[in-house]
Amino acid sequence: MGAIIGIDLGTTNSVAAARNEHGRPEVIPNHEGGHLTPSVVYFGSTPPAVGQEAKEWARVGNEEIASFFKPHMGSAQFKLNFHGKDYDASALSALVLKKLKADAEAHLGKSVDRAVITVPAYFADAQRKATIEAGRLAGLEVARIINEPTAAALAYGLQKTSVDETVLIYDLGGGTFDVTVARITPESVEVLSTAGDHDLGGKNWDDRIASYLAEKFAQETGIDPLDDPQALNEVLLLAEGAKWTLSERAATRISLQIGTTRKTYELSRTDFEAMTFPLMDRTRRLTEEALAEASLRWGGIGGVLLVGGSTRMPMVRQFVKQMSGRDPRAGVNVDEVVALGAAVQAAIEEGRETSDATPKFSLAGARRVSDVMSHSLGVVAVSEDGTSFVNDIVIRRNAPIPAENKKSYAHACRGGSNDRLEVYLTQGESTAPVDCAILGKYVFTDFHVTDREVTVDVAMSYDMNGIVQVKARQRDTGHALTMTVEPVPDDLSWLGKPPEASREPDQSTRIYLLMDVSSSMAGAPLMEGQSAARAFLDKCDFTRTEVGLISFSDVVTLQCGATDNARKVVAAINRLEPDGTTNLAEAIGLARSHLIQNDKRRYIVILTDGYPDAAEAAAEEARTARESGIDIVAIGMGQADLDYLRRLSSTEQGSVFARHGELVSTFGHIARIIAEGGRGLRISS
């Protein structure tokens, strides 16, 4: 049998580690002698180059590069084509794993056939299965999937043989963010709660700088780097370099050249921290969520461990100190600690296989690891009043794994004519299925014939890897039902409709966001509004949707015409600044003038924090827009009046008042409803 290693399969860099001859975990150097292997693949050579060589090709703007694919693990929509062959995120990750495997074999002097691979705690079922598939494609048996913060806690506990405390692990990587509360004792590591966002990481900080550079360059030269893939790559590389420079220095100069045009910009650390503050604030909200799930406050936390290369940014350390009231713990290598913890878990797995119950290092109790899952597991069910589909949660988030639970559901067999029960498995916290991930479609048959309604017990479980299992049993007979797994339909719009509603034909959509940037929006309200607008874009299907942005204060400005280029809209959102009063009437009129194509579903989505100037004129403009077939959603915050919002919107359901902290989820929910056909936001015909 070959060796087993631990692998931190990262968004930007990956690391492998193994137990050395003294029984301690240590990082395995790669072929180039470094500890970090860039998660980058270059397809311009045979075989494809992986790691530092590939990253160098990326720096010179080569287009045959794959990078930042980890956040797309498990996504059926993500495909890259090189030389006529499609690669999904699992296939690309497998190439990185093969490189780590080969380097480990060269260093250890023996074959490597098994691995413990870490994943973000916030990875869902599909992403975990995709990681296991990547290991298989790389020739590795995945002995265990372990959450990255849990691995970090294992490695940290190894250094603290007599510790008994509760710590918070703040893990900000290149593409993901996790926050975990764990209790570490000499005998065990027990995860109490976790929260996170698999689409929040250092890349988001890069994108803020990239948007800033692209916008400045376009304004001064008329050349938009976002329109040219090679220019965009150059901007992203410059943005990443500037981020790391600002981690060491108070300011940096960035020179951007496209063709023969060259511009140089100054960026201070203060400005960088200001433009990325909403990102930091998202980590604060998730951190508070994890503490609340663990029923703890900061006073109950013994220390904070920083994990992930992005925590090297000074703003992170300052922000964590501000939140917790103390400096983060020192002595942890933020790049290597996850891989070292994976090596600890690998030794535990090896001990189980060889009946060697005591791994050869000082944390004797490390074999007792209790982890949790960060997502609730449920099924799509019909509401009690029969008017809607709901997400019925069966296993609550942060339940220790392995976990199993069951719920009972009625099924009308109709004398044997209905021998089919479809179960759609959900992962998420929202009561609305459209806001959750649909993990799979499980069809149960082989009911014992009956003329009446029968009760079916649907059981589901999380195993130690966080992988989901489903089964069902007919209660009155006690026999297990036959299960088949069918593909999840591409069209899930029916989830947002009444159970018996017919589906609407697919249509393209054009949306204008109208953002209040009056003086009262200055500071936190505008930042929350910008975060909400970006969340709205995240839920839009830009293959059939165009989004534009209009800001209104004293001056009404078309910040961005309707486009299917999400980056352009994000750049426009990022540059919003508050000033003056609230000229909503002119803003609605401007949006209406740009929404004249009858072959598109058309929407105006308004965000305002109070009464506008000329309130009656704005209401009249809204009425005219509605009469021309434009659907209006009015979202208020701060001093906005719900009754007035109802006068603007197409329906009562399309007028929403969002309290502080609710705006992001409100915008996301509205976007999902629009994407699924807009039912509930339009006047019934």
Image: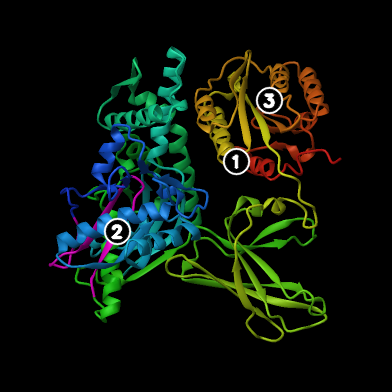
Amino acid on which the number 1 mark rests in the picture: Asp
Residue at image position (75%, 78%) is 454
Span shown in magenta:
1-28
* Location of residue 500 with respect to 254 vertically, above or below: below
* Location of residue 307 with respect to 625 vertically, above or below: below
Q: Give left or right: position of 314 versus 639.
A: left
Image coordinates for residue 116, horizontal then vertical, percent: 32, 64
Element class at badge 2: strand
Colouring used for the render: rainbow
Count residues near mark 3 (Cα–Cα under 10 Å), then give few for <14, some for 14-19, many for 20+.
many
Instruction: Please give the residue where the numbered disc 1 appears in the rendered image.
Output: 541
Instruction: Please give the residue where the numbered disc 3 appears in the rendered image.
Output: 610
Residue 19 part of the magenta segment: yes
Instruction: Please give the residue where the numbered disc 2 appears in the rendered image.
Output: 7
Quarter of the figure with residue 498: bottom right
Residue 1 seen in the current view:
yes
Amino acid on which the number 3 mark rests in the picture: Gly
